[in-house]
Image: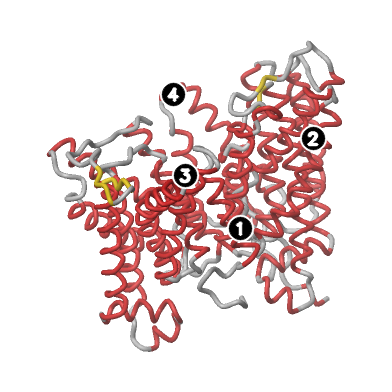
Amino acid sequence: MTRTLCPSRALGLPVAALVLIVLPRIVSNSFAIDIFVRVLLFAFIGVAWNLMGGYAKQLSLGHAAFFGLGAYTSTILLIRFGVSPWIGIVAGGVVAMLASLPIGTLCFRLRGPYFAIATIGTAQTLMLLFLKFRNFAWGAEGTTIPYRGNSPMMMQFDAKAAYYYIALIMLAIGLAITYWIERCWVGYYLVAVGEDQDAAEAVGVNVPRIKRDIYLISAFLTGLAGTFYVQYIYFIDPNTAFNFNVSVQAALVSIVGGVGTLWGPVVGTILLEPTSALVQSWLGGAHGGVQLTLYAVILMAVIMWRPTGVLGVLTGAYERIVRPAPSGVAGTATAGPKGPLDG
Amino acid sequence: MAGVVAQAVVNGLLIGGIYALVSIGVTLIFGVVKIVNFAQGEFVMIGMYISFWLASRFGLDPVASLVVSMPALFVAGVLLQKFLIRRVLGLGDMPQIFLTFALSLLLMNLALLLFTANYRTVQTSYTLSAIHIGPLYVGVAKLIAFVLAMLLSGALEVFLRATDLGKAMRASAQNREVAMLMGVNPDHVFGVAMGLSLALAGAAGSLLMPFYPVYPGVGQVFVLMAFVAVVLGTLGNVTGALIAGLMMGMAESLGVQFVGADSGLIVVFAMLLLTLALRPSGLFGARTR
């Protein structure tokens, strides 16, 4: 995104925030609120993925690993030890974060496509392991989260709007972290790694360390999302927690929206998630595969014709229509300044 | 005990022939075109559906339907290169990964829409027959698949070493710029490499059909094996992929035998992680990267 501040943008954020806050009061339809919650949740996962996949171009297809670890950590704490999911969600994030250390150590030995494959492998291995943990983690059958009525201390609410606000806060945190990273040296380093690892290393970026650190943050946030999702749907099994679709969606919303941009994952989710929910409710469960077919076609179209994503298209159009682009500022969405490493 | 191990090794080796075919396809595309084809497994699936269709409609033997599935997928590979892959070459990792990844999702889910999730099998006269070699049982269908897989791999090896086109392919795998300076036409070479690679996937599908059920997600089983085998056998190394493919088959089979029926994949991923930890450049790569 361009970094120029203009009055309309300064005003836009508070207005958008206000609209988002009052939205569940205006729309009371629970189907609509469910879609809103999913949009916020997947935008949040997309934001977490984007930190790594967008800025540092470490294309993970295994974020389901962290989603699942977060989900299982809080659920095991809740059911086995009666620990509130409010503590569990942080614990889940921390477990996901810790897991990212060994996973990263192994997977970062590979680059590009083979990094992606290794991450798929780790997520799949975790799913297979949790299928085997029959005594401790309920194996393939999974378990339901015991319903205790409206108990805010246990992250259980009768009103769906409550989940909406939690997801909204999580997304705001994710965006704030991204905003901060984009603007401090970490962001420049990440973009440098994303552009060319060897060149970044040559100018003194500690590449392994920066990759490890961003993986930690990304895994932590994804772990939070896992706990939230389980608390939202009241059910967990390995197939839900480590579902490959989570990994796919995380990457997909970012790429469709605009990879390596602050708002890209949000824009991508707003476009994709309601579309797929509507298609699904329209066709019913009868046509398995419609949703992913649709996603695949959208993904291919974006890659072939608009690699900067929807946000790139919008920014480009905005710059062309509203004002002539200042020289040197490209309307692309490839994230932030490219040069100033030496400055 | 020794008999059990030997039987598991033989079973693994036989299915490993199929893994080798898929792996060689992946590594060939990676070596020559420099992209990873996430959709390779889906082309195995398409090969299987072609054979299934020919068998159920015309009673054609699945192994004989190689003569249809291989050319069909060769053409598909050339077209894929011409209309999709060519447009993302040189654009960096992201478009390349997600293009073939999206293709994989698309083919798998289209198959789900068109053919439903049902498992389909083809019964041949030799599906259930086995021959005894000493104390070992060897399934005839698997043996045929293995022998043909090895013949096809050998034929590819001869093609790469003895023909001009094959040499051009190896040259562009080694150094694309220099190969182009020597007059190699990259579009042509890449197209043929894609075609050959998909033809091998199609062959794997046809060879599997007498003893393996086909369903839309079947490709995932083989592509994961192939990816691990390709890392283990060093990226872009055809012989390495062949040997590693056979090893993967044996590792999986021993895992199923000694860890548990659902543990084949765990053993495979454990091998991937071990490879990454101990020898990231694979068995046949240089130590430095």
Q: Residue at x 48, y 48 (%)?
A: B254
> As shown in the figure, which amino acid type bears the numbered disc 3?
Ala
Residue at mark 1: A320
Residue B55, percent across and down? 18, 40
Say few, some or many: other residues with alpha carbon within 10 Å of mark 2 (under 14 / 14 to 19 / 20 or more): few
Give the CA separation, mark 4 to mark 1: 39 Å
Q: Residue at x 62, y 53 (%)?
A: A60
- Callout 1: SS: helix
Q: Is residue A228 visible?
A: yes
> Which of the pair B208/A164 is nearer the observer?
B208
Residue at mark 3: A296
Give the CA separation, mark 3 to mark 1: 30 Å
User: Does label 4 or label 1 sit earlier along the sequence?
Assistant: 4
Residue at mark 2: A17
Say few, some or many: other residues with alpha carbon within 10 Å of mark 4 (under 14 / 14 to 19 / 20 or more): few
Q: Is residue B100 visible?
A: no
User: Does label 1 or label 2 sit earlier along the sequence?
Assistant: 2
